């Protein structure tokens, strides 16, 4: 696949992200119907008892409340928000746009979610390749998004596309990053915010295992 042009990932506000996310925002960025749709995606695809990475996390993870997980790790931009998240076992403050390398060992997690944040990544394919490394073989990644965003921090590609185009863009991100069986889901409630999910899976075997 051809790489995506770099100009698609410029933003109106190119000041350091640490400045923008310095103040905690204890608000929900999608309405209750869309939140329920995210939770249902996690209920459907995340293995109970597994180790979950909440990438680009905040003060709420939208995980199904009745499902236990061995560990839920959050990576996000604001320490106060992460500290207030009751589902996190631990958290890391890390700016993926400044450093797209994830600070986790290979095979650390059995599932990962990116909720309503994929539009802010300036190098999403590199981040997702790193995410794939941190996942176990055959693990799901659920990327969910709506039509809401912080407009000055969303990349230009997000502004140029409609909902269908954004779904296709996220599918391509995951495919370029090496995820398999990439599938899109329209889980928009009957009224309120639309909600879309794209799910990709890590290969069942790691490259060194497949070659042996």
Image (cartoon, rainbow, N blue to C red):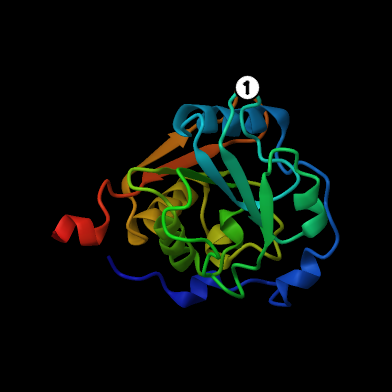
Foreground residue, 32 or 126?
126
Above-or-below relation of 14 to 132: below
Position of 160 with respect to 153 (left or right) is left
Residue 146 appears anywhere in the view = no
Q: Position of residue 203 (x, y in %)?
A: 29, 49
Residue drawn at x 45%, y 43% is 110
Residue drawn at x 34%, y 55% is 175
Quarter of the image with the N terminus is bottom left
Q: Residues within 10 Å of mark 1 (few under 14, many from 20)?
A: few
Above-or-below relation of 5 to 191: below
Position of 14 with respect to 187 (left or right) is right
What residue is disc 1 on?
66
Q: Position of residue 199 (x, y in %)?
A: 42, 42
Q: Residue furthest left?
A: 212
Count the marks. Answer: 1
Residue drawn at x 50%, y 76% is 7
Q: Position of residue 192 (x, y in %)?
A: 68, 30
Residue drawn at x 68%, y 44% is 88
Position of 66 with respect to 13 (left or right) is left
Residue 118 appears anywhere in the view = yes
The answer to which image quadrant residue 206 occupies is: bottom left
| Secondary structure of residue under mark 1 | loop
Q: Position of residue 4 (x, y in %)?
A: 40, 69
Above-or-below relation of 11 to 72: below
Foreground residue, 21 or 91?
91
Quarter of the image with the C terminus is bottom left
């Amino acid at each position: 696949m051809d790489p995506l042009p770099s100009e698609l990932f410029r933003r109106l506000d190119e000041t350091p992200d640490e400045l923008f996310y310095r103040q905690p925002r204890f608000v929900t960025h999608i309405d209750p119907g869309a939140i329920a749709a995210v939770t249902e995606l996690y209920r459907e695809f995340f293995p109970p008892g597994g180790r979950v990475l909440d990438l680009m996390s905040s003060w709420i993870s939208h995980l199904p409340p009745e499902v236990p997980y061995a560990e839920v790790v959050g990576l996000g931009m604001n320490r106060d928000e992460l500290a207030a998240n009751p589902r996190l076992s631990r958290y890391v403050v890390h700016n993926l746009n400044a450093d797209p390398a994830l600070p986790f060992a290979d095979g650390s997690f059995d599932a990962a979610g990116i909720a309503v944040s994929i539009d802010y990544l300036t190098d999403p394919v590199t981040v997702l390749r790193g995410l794939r490394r941190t996942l176990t073989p055959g693990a799901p990644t659920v990327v969910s998004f709506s039509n809401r965003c912080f407009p000055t921090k969303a990349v230009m590609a997000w502004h140029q596309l409609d909902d269908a185009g954004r779904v296709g863009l996220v599918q391509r991100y995951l495919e370029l990053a090496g995820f398999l069986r990439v599938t899109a889901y329209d889980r928009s409630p009957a009224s309120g915010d639309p909600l879309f999910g794209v799910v990709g899976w890590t290969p069942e075997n790691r490259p060194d295992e497949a070659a042996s």
